[in-house]
Image (cartoon, helix red, strand yellow):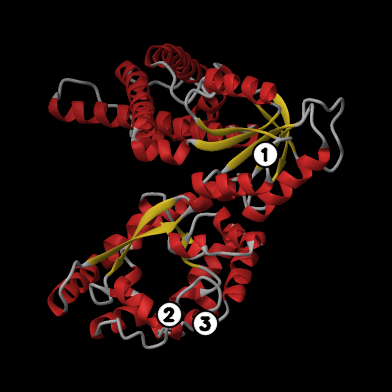
Amino acid sequence: MLRRQRQIRAQVQQWVDAGLFAIAFWLAHGVRELAVIYSPGLPDIQPFEHYLWLYLFLFPGTLLLLKALGFYNRPLLFSRRETAWVLSHAVIIAVLGVVTVLFLRKQELARSVIFLFGGFSFVLVMAKEELQRRWLLSKLGQEQMRRRLVLIGTPADTAELARDLEAKAKGAVEVLAQLDLNQTSSARLIELLHERSANGVILSARHTYFEQVEKVIELCELEGVEVWLLADFFKTRISQTSVDDFLGRPTVVFRSAPEASWQGVAKQLLDFVGALALLVVVSPLLLLAALVVKLTSPGPVLFRQQRSGLNGRPFTMLKFRTMVSDAEQLKAELASFNEMDGPVFKVTNDPRVTGPGRFLRKWSIDELPQLWNVLRFEMSLVGPRPLPVDEIRRINDLAHRRRLSVKPGLTCLWQISGRNDVKSFTEWVRLDLEYIDNWSLWLDVKILLKTIPVVLTGAGAK
């Protein structure tokens, strides 16, 4: 994991943990208040509002305390015992800090609240750590967190780097291949990137020529795959270059997709919360649509298809079935009526679409099950529409594959620019690349807002 990504992850953890310490204090006070109700002999305590000023010290204090103790320098899958040991030190210091602040301000607080605060803080943060551990060890969590890398350089360099990754990355990366830069052809590299859905290439160029390095970077740039150039042959930092570090090695990163940032974290949060809220709101509509599909035509309610996700990695996309059950078999008979150039198949008034299916398509109801794909982190609310795996394989222009460098989405510039009225695949790709090159969280919000009237009016749907 690059330094920038580690920093973002650590900062997110800091704010979450500080919030848990704050919740622990509120819980401790609440439990003590309840104790007064069930044990009338206990003395009353001041209401919680009386101690709100403590958060001015508690929140920033725990942020700095856990960082100072090295709590965020641990590997993702750290020993539970060591985690508990470091956390217990932090809790003890935090409790002593609260006592000290109360003493200096000459404020009184029941001792039980202080002890409960320490206990709740420890339990809440450890529970968070355990949930995070279970997520990272789950199949879905490993798929989301693991980087799939191709190592390129001399055999000696790639072998050394592979050993470093095995020793230090702790399962956070998967080495797909080790290639000799002087022996591997461009065709072989492209084939490997397509077959294995790599999302990173690490170049160790100390003993190779920059001509070969440039070719690899150009190929990966077209593919939308990040390149990490191990730059430990540099004596000084080169100006106007983006330099990071990878396992302590200076690294030049070439990227043609949005970099890791707080906006990226906010986008993931927007995706999860937005998809969850939408699923709750539209659940009656989902049930009604499922019933209509079931009663009006034979076949399954949901249509499942392998689509190309981030970096071309296949995933199963869900839609309400809007066509006859043998639609895929009939597709070959309609090939001559295809209205879209390139690998994409589009036919106006497609005879395979059922009557209710046309209604579901017009109002985009058939796409709603993809909210589940968003919750599984396979898709985003906003991003290039995912294409079937077989259509991606037929892309001839490598530059068009860069649309795979971000997660696919439910809506994007194509949807708010006429949907099926856009007949050129080249124009479709141009809109997707325009989105990638100009991405910001505000652009996502604008696209979501513009999607609402498009869906409500059925604009461009056929």
- Per the rendering, the mark at residue 121 is none
Q: Which residue is mark 2?
A: 335
The residue under the point 42% across, 80% down is: 335
Residue occupying the point 65% across, 26% down: 158
Amino acid type indicated by mark 3:
Gly
Question: Which-is-in-front pick, marks 3 and 2?
Answer: 2
Q: Residue at x 20, y 30 (%)?
A: 34
Query: Which one is nearer the viewer's eye here, 440 or 204?
Result: 204
Q: Nearer the viewer, residue 344 or 448?
A: 344
Distance from Cα at disc 1 to Cα at disc 2: 37 Å
332 vs 225: above or below: below
User: Foreground residue, 43 or 221?
Assistant: 221
Q: Position of residue 176 (x, y in %)?
A: 53, 35
Query: Which secondary structure lies at badge 3?
Result: loop
- Residue 386 location (% of width, % of height): 46, 62
Instruction: Give the residue furthest to the bottom.
Output: 349
Mark closer to the chain start, 1 or 2: 1
**First-in-chain label (1 vs 3):** 1
Residue 184 numbered tag: 1
Report, in whole angstroms, how far the alpha carbon at label 3 lies from the one at label 2. 23 Å
Mark 1 is on which residue type?
A: Thr
Lateral position of residue 363 relative to residue 427, left or right: left
Q: Specify the amino acid type for callout 2.
A: Ala
